[in-house]
Amino acid sequence: MANIDTPIPALKLNDGNSMPMLAYGTGTAWYKTGDEGKLDQAMIDSVKTAIKLGYTHLDGAQMYKTETELGIAIKESGVPREKLFITTKIPGGDDIEGALRTSLKKLQVEYVDLYLIHHPFWAQSPSDLQTAWKTMEHVRTLGLTKSIGVSNFLPTHLETILSTASVPPVCNQIEFHAYLQRPDLLAVHKKHGIATVAYGPLTPITKASPGPVDEVLKVLVKKYAVNEAEILLRWCLDQDVVAVTTSGKEQRLSDYLRVARFKLTPREIEMVNERGVEKHYRAFFQKQFGEGDRS
């Protein structure tokens, strides 16, 4: 593994474990719509490149159909398992233990560091979520995962599982960026000590451009001699938000690691926030929300 001159910071979770704050994601760009059995060599190579550059947090999911590729890349990287932080997710609430064991086989590891319920929208009732969470607690006691959390949960879903949980979720992985800041949801996270993990943090420049944050980014890019993506990733980190991003380009992945070398000032974070709220954009799970719904 390459030595990065400034290591990526880690966030301490509510169960005592730590999570590297910049993750390489195997969804979005690598998501398979076709046959899961057909290996994507480009993705394997890209994950190996990411690991070589110094990424240790690798984010996967059953839904992406890329766990096999992630497992091959991890094995071929030669990096010891304990030096990596591996996340995967179950799409629904059925046979959580069986699904996790299948994921572990594909990943070629004995445990994951973090197992997430990918989203709550499959649940027919609050008890569905509570039952699923009990099983998540069970797979943790079995040692199949070190930490358990959720993804795409809203305050009502979080309160539902917390009301019967023995172990609270360590995190909620959500779409989070300057054009979807979700203050009410983040307040619930803070209240319960739940970490925020952002996917789609680069949305303002990849899918929602042009927009009101562009001129702020231009100023910050000049000041810090980095690119817009690095400013947006640092904006997450400076708010104690873990950022999940991806790329098939080695140079871009290398550039992202420079986020460890600088910090935005509180005023600069505020400037991005202030301009960001002038526009609303949701890139994922649009069918679950009304057009202007910022929750």
Image (tube, helix red, strand yellow):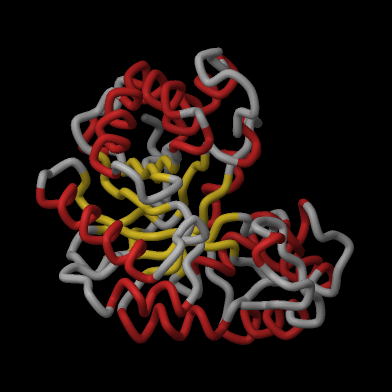
> Quick one: 39 or 91, which is closer to the camera?
91
* Quadrant that contains the N terminus: top left
Residue 48, given in percent of the width and then of the height, sits at 46, 24
Q: Residue furthest front?
A: 124
Q: Residue at x 68, y 55 (%)?
A: 229
Q: Residue at x 85, y 59 (%)?
A: 209
Eyeballing the image, is 123 above or below 94? below
> Quick one: 196 or 148, which is closer to the camera?
148
Residue 41, given in percent of the width and then of the height, sits at 56, 14
Residue 12, given in percent of the width and then of the height, sits at 27, 66
Eyeballing the image, is 2 above or below 5? above
Eyeballing the image, is 191 above or below 85? below
**217 sits left or right of 144 in the view:** right
Residue 83 found in image quarter? top left
Count of number-bearing discs: 0
Residue 170, given in percent of the width and then of the height, sits at 30, 65
**7 sits left or right of 49 in the view:** left
Q: Residue at x 38, y 37 (%)?
A: 3
* Quadrant that contains the C terminus: bottom right
Residue 210 found in image quarter? bottom right
> Quick one: 38 or 127, which is closer to the camera?
127
Q: Residue furthest right?
A: 210
**20 sits left or right of 186 in the view:** left
Q: Residue at x 40, y 32 (%)?
A: 2
> Quick one: 42 or 114, which is closer to the camera?
114
Residue 145 found in image quarter? top left
